[in-house]
Image (spheres, grey):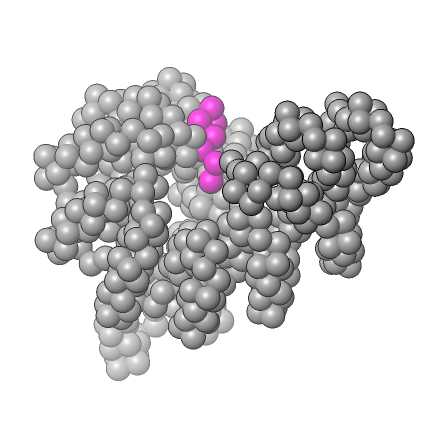
Amino acid sequence: EDLYREAVHTNGLTPDIGTLNSLIFAAADGLNQSGAEHWYREAVDKYRLTPTMRTFNCLMFSSGGKNMSGAEHWYSMAVSEFGLTPNVKTFRCLIFHAAHAGNQTRAEYWYSESLHTLGLRPDIRFFNHLIFAAAGNDGNQSGTEHWYREAVDTFGFRPIAGTFEPLIRAATMSGNMTGAEHWYRQAVRYDTRADMGIFNSLISCAVLTNQMKRARFWFDKAVSLGLEPDVQTYHFMIRAASRRGNLTAAEEWAERLTATNVEPDVFIYASLISAAANAGNLSSAEGWLQRCSEKGLRPDGFVFLPLVMEASKRADLATATRWYNEALAAGATLDIRFFNYVVKALVGKQDLEAAIVWYSRASDQGIEPDREMFDSIVGLAVARDDWEMAEEFLGRAAELGIEPQGMARTVLINAAAQRAFLAITERALEQKDMDGAEMWLSISAEDGFQPAAASLSRIVVAAVGRGDAAQVARLCREARVRGLRLDDEAAAALTQAFGEKAAGELLED
């Protein structure tokens, strides 16, 4: 740019399109879209120069990896307004943008357009982008392999490093360790030097499939080839230890990272906090959070989540609330997933009241509850035989436009059915027909309905009154198996008949 200014502004020279194309290319190479467009305007508006296809290729490239509409805008202008003929670089750029925007259909459209409409011969980078597009976010192995075969078998191209990375990544996302290692061997066969990104994919796949020996093998393999593990590599290894609740292994990997020049990021600390929380060591988890803050890293919601969840699992709501408040004070971003995780932990503890508290906290933060949260709360309310609460939350779901389908409809049907079965059970018990009462309980289960805790409680009270200890034990066992909590009347009857200790064993063991 300095040379340009000297030539034009100091020496009075008039630039040609080649000069301005070079400036557009320089801006595009730095992904400086505004800069590229500035030089385009300089060429077209100020000097009335006619752009070439190279002009537009550079403008398309400057649009950035995911700006497919920007690239297609410049393509349309080149063809429609200036009558230019696109070339191989044009379509390579269009396919690249479509692939990185996650639009496989559009990437394949531009490939077809170049090959069948204009008769252009693709190059290996065409196929690298198409393989990348097929890999996407879900690991479409058949799609990636199709384009690999098209490149190698149909066109006879020799694959390069960029060819194998998305193939290995697709296998990794599908949890296919065998496939990922196959493509690594193919890369070696073609004498393609793998970078740390490829080894990270292999390590990630091993972690995903719980093959820790393979993860360690690929870590050591990368090091033996002179590659330096990066922060993502260590994150995979620490996360693997975290998922197994192996705090010792997680901290050993953290120590190994500290001995390198790799700077830990917030995700490293999140995994260490999770490892400590999973191991039930909240003091260690708090220590890692402190180190995260000391590093000047801003902890987000996912960093605080393991602390809140572990406290919730222990029914220590005071500690869970403390960490929640610290997350808010730290400016952490909390989304519905944060609250869903906590509510699920509380549902596992059968603590409906606490689950509703966290539901309210989500609402207080302006976070709209989703179907998953309503599933959790309504499901627990039903298990607790609290139909009023179940129906109240179904109503709240309906107000938010969550239709009574699936979860809600099943609950409504079960609610009506269980009330009917309760009425029938009570009628049978009034007639001292224990067999009839149990028969209706059995019929409700056979028809796919969860027997109501209220019905089972009435039968337990009647069995206690009859002094039938064997039937009482069987009914209490059935309540436990079905996850039903007998009501206070049943618990009192058991305590009076068998004593507090025996009653407690019947209810809890």
Name the residue nearer the viewer: 370 or 189: 370
Total tally of numbered discs in the picture = 0
Q: Is residue 27 visible?
A: yes
Q: Furthest residue to the bottom?
A: 10
Q: Judge whether 241 appears above or below 192 on screen.
A: below
Q: Estimate the x, y position of residue 283 in percent, counting from the top left.
A: 28, 60
| 227 sits left or right of 312 in the view | left
Q: Residue at x 24, y 36 (%)?
A: 199
Name the residue nearer the viewer: 136 or 502: 502
Q: Estimate the x, y position of residue 48 in percent, counting from the top left.
A: 47, 68
Q: Estimate the x, y position of residue 505 in percent, counting from the top left.
A: 53, 38
Q: Residue at x 21, y 45 (%)?
A: 248
The magenta span reads: 137-143
| 153 sits left or right of 269 in the view | right
Name the residue nearer the viewer: 64 or 28: 64
Name the residue nearer the viewer: 110 or 358: 358
Q: Estimate the x, y position of residue 441 in percent, counting from the top left.
A: 77, 29
Q: Is residue 292 visible?
A: no
